[in-house]
Amino acid sequence: MFGFSLGERHLPRGVRWLLLALLLLLPMEPPPALAVSSEYKLKAALIYKLTRFVEWPRESWQRTDFGICILGRDDFGSALDALESRNVHGLPIRIRRLVQSDAVDSSCQILFVSESKRPFLRSILTSLEGQPILTIGDLDGFAEKGGIIEFVRGRQRIGFRINLQQANRAGLKIAAPLLELSTIVETERT
């Protein structure tokens, strides 16, 4: 059955069962992939803070909640769920996790595009062009490919690259204080 042994000697059956029971009862640490990194906790807080520096078109406020959507693999875990106790301009925040890009709709005011969607990034961003959705990502070149805000890791902080051209197309206005802290980029020509 179970091959517990000490060198050439086998453990008595009762001891083997006791060891097996102890192994099963020991608390297990979640795999590292399920633990939320401090980087993604910070990014979750930044997503919320960004809502204070972005102005959506008036028609975006004719809804019952403010949608923050994650497209692809969710590295935020529970860090984003904590935002559901807050609101943006009087609307409660709702977190939505989306697997397929065709699930993105007007219920998303913010869309974070994860690394797992890299192969489809251009088509995702092209399909959203002109919609009042603040697209955010942390992939290299995200803003140049048509995303609005790209998180960029620095030594001790996270910086921003902003594609103001895309923000304007989406009807979003980004406040000057955020622009002053950011690098402004344009969509690269393909």
Image (spheres, rainbow, N blue to C red):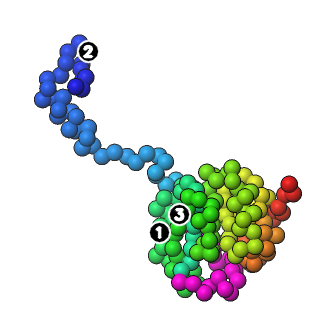
Which corner quadrant of the image does residue 175 belong to?
bottom right
Q: Secondary structure at mark 2?
A: loop
Q: Nearer the viewer, mark 1 or mark 3?
A: 3
Which corner quadrant of the image does residue 24 belong to?
top left
Q: Number of callouts in the render?
A: 3
Tag 3 residue: 97
Q: Is residue 49 magenta?
A: yes
At x 30% / y 46%, what residue is drawn? 27
Which span of residues is magenta-colored? 43-64
Mark positioned earlier in the residue sequence (2 or 3):
2
At x 78% / y 69%, what residue is drawn? 166
Q: Is residue 132 magenta?
A: no
Tag 2 residue: 7
Mark positioned earlier in the residue sequence (2 or 1):
2
Mark positioned earlier in the residue sequence (1 or 3):
1
At x 74% / y 57%, what residue is drawn? 122
The kind of residue on which mark 3 rests is Arg
Residue 124 appears at what percent x and percent y? 69, 60
